[in-house]
Image (cartoon, grey):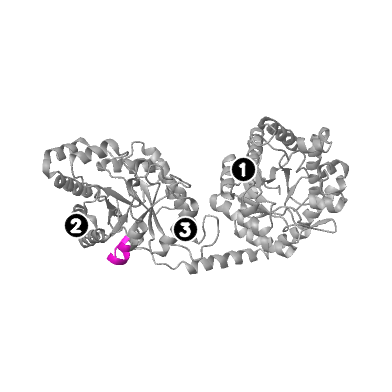
């Protein structure tokens, strides 16, 4: 039976075991100094190189990297071997092929390419053009020799890695790429980039497999892998750690990690999402053999047992009862929620009294806005907590991403959950330039769709954005923003799909004053997505108080369109415009009752008016 292509092998879902260190083995077998030009041994000592490949194949490797890691223009020039660049690279591929043939195995040959070893502009003397030409020279020789894939490895500067990947993609749009970065102190690249950023960049650049190698031992490498996987949950990953941190003993470089330790690593690496597993500096054939043993059947069951046990632990902890909102959404009940803005002082009694009135009128929940219009207000958490504990009404906490970095966001989420605030409305938030403090930080580390993913796919599964455990999983119900009356419906649907794929449970809809727009949105969603629109929507309802307010909303608030007939009714009502606005809101609710799953009433501070809208909902059977 012919061997599967490397890409098809990745699609099987069965982990691929790579080889271990080449330089460490050559250093030990040739007694050459650690800084020798090991790539030249493809020509000077081919039997030694071939025997190392054979040792890894006998240990169970399915992926062999060529001895060409430093066979580029700059490193070979320094060793006086530049004239043999093409020959060294072609020979590296040939020796790997010969070893595979002699072993009788079906293994893949990865053309190993490392960094150039020189500073690249704008931070070094070598121009981008010269760097690209250097990579192209080495890659051309490897491609000509017929590698199954290119394995970029040990890149401490991920922008150089991106450059190398781009060169290969220009030369060969289809050859598989395994791209591995290296991280150091606090799991950052040399230039200070975290694994999540590196993974995202490599995914966009076209890498088939995104990975991490060298730099540290199994523990540090696994931590970086988890961060990468959390950032790119659908990507394919590789991991190849050093055998611990090296030490010099009697003039020799030794690595402490044992083969048994690497066997445990193989299990944890697969559990953490690695598809390709191997070793880097200090790893020997015995390390690879130990990993082979636990990856093979019947011992492969060990991995399944570990995964089942870890999943069982997570499931046993996920015992929080669903929120009232989650239960209402699941049951398809029409839900009435009213937005309340926190006060500009520390006095809360007027707001609590208004909330009592709304609860008595039949409001199911209160939405607590967070710094609406970028105005200074009391903490939304404090208000939501007071409403839940003193009034006994569940809240939806607005959670803007603007003005928070990822550390604060995750800390705030934990604090919200600890206070019992488990319904969230994730939104970008209003820009500070329009508010009380236009010079305040407007930082935005993460888009709403990404934060929804962090909450639903991470924290609700017991891990933070870095893949670290938070103990018991959270149990947030998460809403997103939606404008069903948007002028560009296609764009709105594309953005919404990202939020749905991230796990959004419901949407708070921008106010729509023409119910026909909702039907148009649902129809267009079906046309673009091939399925009916099913996300529960609590549609914003704004009881208009005056013609002036209506004209302001229509002309100055993006996404709100108020038709001429409503404007005319408000104008005709004169001093009774607020009553006319109430009736308009009630009529709109009647028309939208079968199109949405709830009302999100925005009263602009007039909570008595909001209570009348809520009471109307409770009085009408069409809203049940």
Q: Tell me the CA gap for discs 3 and 1.
A: 33 Å
The location of residue 108, given as percent across then percent down, is 72, 47
Percent position of residue 506, x then y: 36, 53
Number of marks in picture: 3
- Residue shown at the point (49%, 69%) measured from the top left: 316
- Snapshot quadrant of residue 556: top left
Q: In which quarter of the image is residue 172?
A: top right
Residue denoted by label 2: 615
Residue at image position (74%, 54%) is: 61
Q: How crowded is mark 2: few (under 14 residues within 10 Å), some or many (20 or more)?
A: some
Query: In this view, which residue lies farthest toward the top?
Result: 129
Label 1 sits on a secondary structure element that is loop
Question: Where does label 3 land, which residue?
Answer: 411
Establish if 240 lies above or below 39.
Answer: below
Looking at the image, do the residues carrying marks 3 and 1 touch, with CB atoms under 8 Å apart?
no
In x, y percent, where is residue 602? 26, 50
Q: Mark 1 points at which residue?
A: 207
State if disc 2 and disc 1 touch (CB < 8 Å). no
160 on left or right of 382: right
Looking at this view, is 516 or 49 the one in front? 49
Label 3 vs label 1, nearer the camera: 3
Q: Please tell me whether residue 389 belongs to the stretch shown in magenta.
A: yes
């Amino acid at each position: 039976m012919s061997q599967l292509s490397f890409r098809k092998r990745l699609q099987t879902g069965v982990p691929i075991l790579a080889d271990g260190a080449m330089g460490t083995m050559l250093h030990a077998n040739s007694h050459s100094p650690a800084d020798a030009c090991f790539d030249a041994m493809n020509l000077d000592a081919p039997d030694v190189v071939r025997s190392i490949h054979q040792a890894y194949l006998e240990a169970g490797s399915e992926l062999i990297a060529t001895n060409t890691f430093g066979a580029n223009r700059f490193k070979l020039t320094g060793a006086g071997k530049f004239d043999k660049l093409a020959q060294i690279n072609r020979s590296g591929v040939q020796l790997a092929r010969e070893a595979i043939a002699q072993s009788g195995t079906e293994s893949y040959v990865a053309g190993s390419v490392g960094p150039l070893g020189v500073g690249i502009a704008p931070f070094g003397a070598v121009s981008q053009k010269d760097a690209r030409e250097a990579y192209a020279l080495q890659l051309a020789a490897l491609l000509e020799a017929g590698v199954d894939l290119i394995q970029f490895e040990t890149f401490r500067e991920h922008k150089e890695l991106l450059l190398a990947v781009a060169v290969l993609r220009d030369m060969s749009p289809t050859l598989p790429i395994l791209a591995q970065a290296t991280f150091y102190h606090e799991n950052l690249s040399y230039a200070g980039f975290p694994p999540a950023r590196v993974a995202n960049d490599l995914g966009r650049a076209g890498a088939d497999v995104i990975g991490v190698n060298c730099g540290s031992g199994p523990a540090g490498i696994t931590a970086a892998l988890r961060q990468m996987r959390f950032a790119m949950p659908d990507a394919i990953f590789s991991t190849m750690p050093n055998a611990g941190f090296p030490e010099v003993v009697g003039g020799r470089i030794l690595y402490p990690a044992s083969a048994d330790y690497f066997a445990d690593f193989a299990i944890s690496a697969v559990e953490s999402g690695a598809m390709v597993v191997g070793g880097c500096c200090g790893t020997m054939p015995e390390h690879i053999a130990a990993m082979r043993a636990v990856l093979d059947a019947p011992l492969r069951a060990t991995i399944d047992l570990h995964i089942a046990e870890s999943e069982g632990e997570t499931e046993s902890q996920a015992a929080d009862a669903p929120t009232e909102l989650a239960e209402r959404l699941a049951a398809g009940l029409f839900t009435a929620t009213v937005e309340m803005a926190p006060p500009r002082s520390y006095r809360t009694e007027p707001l609590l009294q208004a909330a009592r009135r709304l609860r008595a009128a039949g409001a199911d929940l209160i939405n607590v806005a967070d710094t609406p219009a970028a105005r200074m207000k009391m903490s939304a958490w404090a208000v939501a907590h007071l409403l839940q504990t003193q009034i006994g009404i569940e809240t939806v906490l607005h959670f803007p991403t603007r003005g928070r970095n990822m550390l604060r966001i995750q800390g705030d989420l934990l604090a919200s959950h600890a206070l019992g605030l488990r319904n969230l409305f994730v939104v970008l938030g209003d820009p500070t330039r329009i508010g009380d403090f236009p010079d305040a930080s407007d930082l935005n580390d993460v888009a709403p769709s990404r934060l929804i993913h962090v909450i639903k796919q991470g924290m609700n599964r017991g891990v933070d954005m870095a893949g670290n455990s938070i103990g018991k999983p959270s149990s947030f119900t998460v809403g997103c923003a939606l404008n069903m009356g948007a002028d560009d419906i296609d764009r709105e649907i594309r953005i919404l799909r990202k939020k749905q794929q991230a796990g959004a449970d419901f949407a708070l809809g921008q106010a729509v004053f023409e119910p026909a727009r909702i039907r148009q949105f649902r129809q267009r969603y079906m046309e673009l997505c091939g399925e009916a629109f099913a996300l529960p929507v609590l549609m914003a309802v704004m009881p208009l108080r005056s013609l002036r307010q209506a004209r302001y909303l229509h002309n100055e608030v993006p996404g709100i369109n108020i038709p001429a007939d409503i404007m005319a009714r408000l104008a005709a009502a004169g001093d009774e415009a607020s009553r006319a606005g109430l009736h308009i809101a009630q009529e709109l609710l009647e028309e939208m009752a079968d199109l949405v799953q709830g009302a999100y009433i925005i009263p602009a501070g007039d909570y008595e008016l909001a209570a009348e809208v809520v009471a109307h909902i409770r009085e009408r059977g069409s809203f049940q």
